[in-house]
Image (cartoon, grey):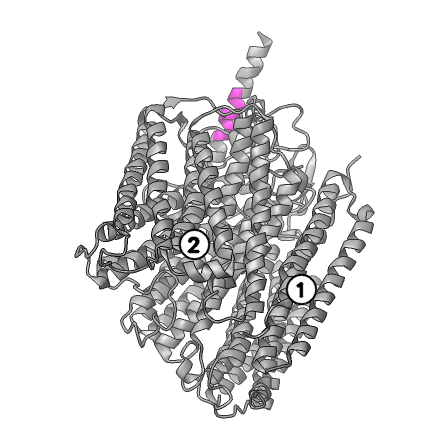
Amino acid sequence: MSESADQLSQGATALRLHRQLSAIWATGPGIQRLAAVNHSVIGIRMMVTSFVFFAIAGVLGMLTRVQLATPNSGFMVPETYNQVFTMHGSMMLFLFAIPMVESFAVYLTPKILGTRDFAFPRLTAYGYWCYLFGGTILTVSLIVGVAPNSGWFMYTPLSSSAFTPGINSDVWLLGVTFVEISALSLAVEIVVSILKMRAPGMSLDRMPIFAWYILVTAMMMIVAFPPLILGSILLEVERAFGLPFFDPTRGGDALLWQHLFWLFGHPDVYIIFLPMAGVLSTIIPVFANRELVGYRAIVVAIIALAFLSFGIWVHHMFTVGIPHLALAFFSLGSAIVAVPTAVQIFAWLATLAHGRPRWDVPMLYVFGFFFIFVMGGLTGVMLAMVPFDWQAHDTYFVVAHMHYVVAGALAFPMLAALYYWLPLLTGRTAVHRLSVPAFWLVFIGFNMTFFMMHLTGLRGMPRRIHTYSGDEGWNWLNLLSSVGGFVMTIGFALVVIDLVVQLRYGRRVRRNPWGSTTLEWAMPIPPAPYAFASIPDVGTSGGKSTASGDLATSLASGEGYLGSTRNGWQEALGVHKTSGVPDQLIVLPRPTYLPLYTALATAAAVLAMLFKFYLLSLGFALLTAGLFVLAGQSAGLSRDYGPLPVGRGVSVPPHTEAADAPAWLALICALVADGTLFTSLLFGTFYLWIAAPNWSAAIKPEPDLMLAVGTCVTLLVAALAARGSLRAVSAGGRAGGWIGLAGLALLAAIATAVWQIAGIVPHPREHALGATAAALTFYVALHAGIGVLFLISNTLRLGAGFISPRRVLDMRLTRLWLDYTLVTGIIAMGLVLALPALVAMLGGRP
Amino acid sequence: MRERPVPSRQLWWLAAGFTVWCSALVVLYAIQGIGCAFAWPTGTLRLWLAVALLVHLIVLGWMWRDIARASPDFGSGPTGALLHWAVVATLITALVATVITLGPPLLLTACI
């Protein structure tokens, strides 16, 4: 009797708390949905959007298979075919694969970490809108017949204006860069949230393996995307303004594009694979009924994999004429990257071997993954061997390998994940009568399509050909590939039908139908907007487990941290990075239209650039920057609070008063990305110096020493003034003078940099030597300009009371930005000054 | 008794070993490119490459020895134990990767 009364009381408390939290966290109805910033909402939207792009890209893939099914096919004219296969690859990679794994990360990571949302919900929303608009630009270009047509890796000079004079390449360069903004912003968000927002007590050794995978992947994205962003910017600048970075007739080099592209492109394979490996490392132990074997070894393996994947980009360039010795570095690297991958495969097999595996639909797809990924991995080792690669390069063998490792490693774990986590979203399970045949159709169709490509490739069929004559011995293999493609498509269609049927007629399940131990199952299904009514303590769950459902009940009735509401705040907990001890109360922003407006302004800047309205584009870019500053005006708290109780006898300060606030780590991540872009620019300069023709014959550069030194000195003054303003605010004094001094110094730095660009010899349009000097100097000016935005934001927030002696984060961020600007400024100016000496050295070459 | 938290800066050590591997790869690739561009004699080029490789191996070996000895600093309960083990393992793995990927190629033709 008393137990039942307790349960009733617990239920009433849970219901009351649910209503209070829902009023604070829920996204509004109707048009207010556009203001959503919640990770569950954005995650689902991103997932749906990525699957729409998957469907479009899949149809394009089918069109290529129709074209190639028979020889001498007139189904598509060559120009249409070029656009179709280019868009198939570009959409699959940039609009489906990366966003899809990110959508899983966005939706699941906070839940698996036991927190309520990401650290920067508005950034999540901005990232989504950028992805949607960028993808839409690419899709519309296809409909109106001006889609990119130079292949998904856009090799120069084919993609340069000489050979692609229309806007096709511009669509790719601008659209994909737009989407990459989304990927980078989400990567920063993910790193910060995993390190700073786990459930209390979730020290690194207790962190679910999925979070390790996502953390490493997000860090890889922060380093991998900037080289491609730089390459895209340089190629767009070449196409729009004539600066010849990739034009060998004017001191550029087409191979520079390949280096920049594959510095991104190879790690990208692992950026796609690792989250899916995280899915497998989560699912397999659940179905094997035992803990994952080799947790620690897997952590080391994914760190090794992340680094090794960056060091082997040249294996995509084995045939471009690089000497044997250098080729061997990358050949051996490509071979040993299989080792950390194999560590994971064996850990999964050992988990299954030592457990008591049970079969269900997700496990079918796990089986499919093993089969396909091991085959793809083995052909990868074959291609890592230079002599074999020379024979197979640019044939369908590479197409087959690529689909086995990227599509296979992505599609099968993705479907396993969908079937595994759909009960979390819908509260229902799949209909086996549909899901099992769907699996077999996908599996058989996949192998039928892509296995044949190994054979056509070995028989010499080059990739990207529009048609073939029919006497090469490829006919029946191509026909089988095409038939397999349709079988696979029928399988995917059945999966879609199965999912729709599941939504409507699937068997209802209780919470946690698989008996998992991860925290995403310790919440109501489908999840509420606040995810957890109270935050669990992983270290002291008091014997309550996710698997039994006790923990969920306890959290729902507010027995964890933050089990009540306060001031209408969206509250989450910040923790120490390694130990998981609570160290701050993070107050998150409420739904707002600002991310949508900012993404619209960014889209307008991109579109204006695309249609060559450059001043208009600049105007929209400034508007975007202004909206970012505006977004900052409502961030944080406008007064000091001191330590606030967060439950279980713990009190912590709000994040605005904490030393290790999420924004600090976010800026460090952003600077790592920025620093990678800068390093890529330095690499590009040195690469052109050593490899491009015509540098020794160019007009001798004459950089202005006084202006270059002036730029560095003014940046130094700005950095020192930022320190002065931080000291002044910390001491309770006025910082206006220091901020003004820093602002003046930055304006002077911009002026001297622009003056230098105006006087660069040789002219940046005439020779890549001048173009690289202009790019380096512009980089400095741009960063000084962003520094001015930081100062404007500081001034506004000081006036509005968001900064106090205890809330000095803004000033610390400004100081960090200006320090970075100073260091990169000195390096950039130093290189510009060194260019004459470098060119003179070339004269001494034999 | 609550364990002493492992300082956040120790996380950087997880990347240390393979950062040295990356550095070795970039430096050797750059030396090879510059040496070939300026037609250095093969012996000189090979010597520079070997010296650069050796320096990186020494750095990795020194870090391994240093970290292996530093276990008390990492030893803040299971978190410290995990991080210490992972850092040592990444250092050893990076050392092996450096030897395998960058050692044997030095015997090959330098500039053809």
Give the x, y percent position of residue B9.
71, 54
Query: Residue drawn 55% across and 40% down?
Result: A345
> Split into 4 quadrants, where in the image is the C terminus of chain A?
bottom right
* Mark-to-mark CA distance, 1 and 2: 31 Å
**Mark 2 packing: few (<14 Cα in 10 Å), some, or many (20+)?**
many
Question: Left or right of A663: which side holds A474?
Answer: left
Question: Left or right of A430: which side holds A356?
Answer: right
- Secondary structure of the residue carrying tag 1 is helix
Depth check, front residue: A777 or A407? A407
Residue identifier under label 1 = A729
Residue identifier under label 2 = A126
Give the x, y percent position of residue B88.
73, 49
Depth check, front residue: A159 or A206? A159
Give the x, y percent position of residue A521.
51, 29
Question: Left or right of A678: which side holds A415?
Answer: left
Chain at numbered mark 2: A
| Residue situated furthest top in the rendering | A1
Q: Quadrant of residue A29?
A: top left
Q: Amino acid at mark 1?
A: Val
> Split into 4 quadrants, where in the image is the N terminus of chain A?
top right
**Residue A333 visible, this orientation:** yes
* First to last magenta residue range: A11-18
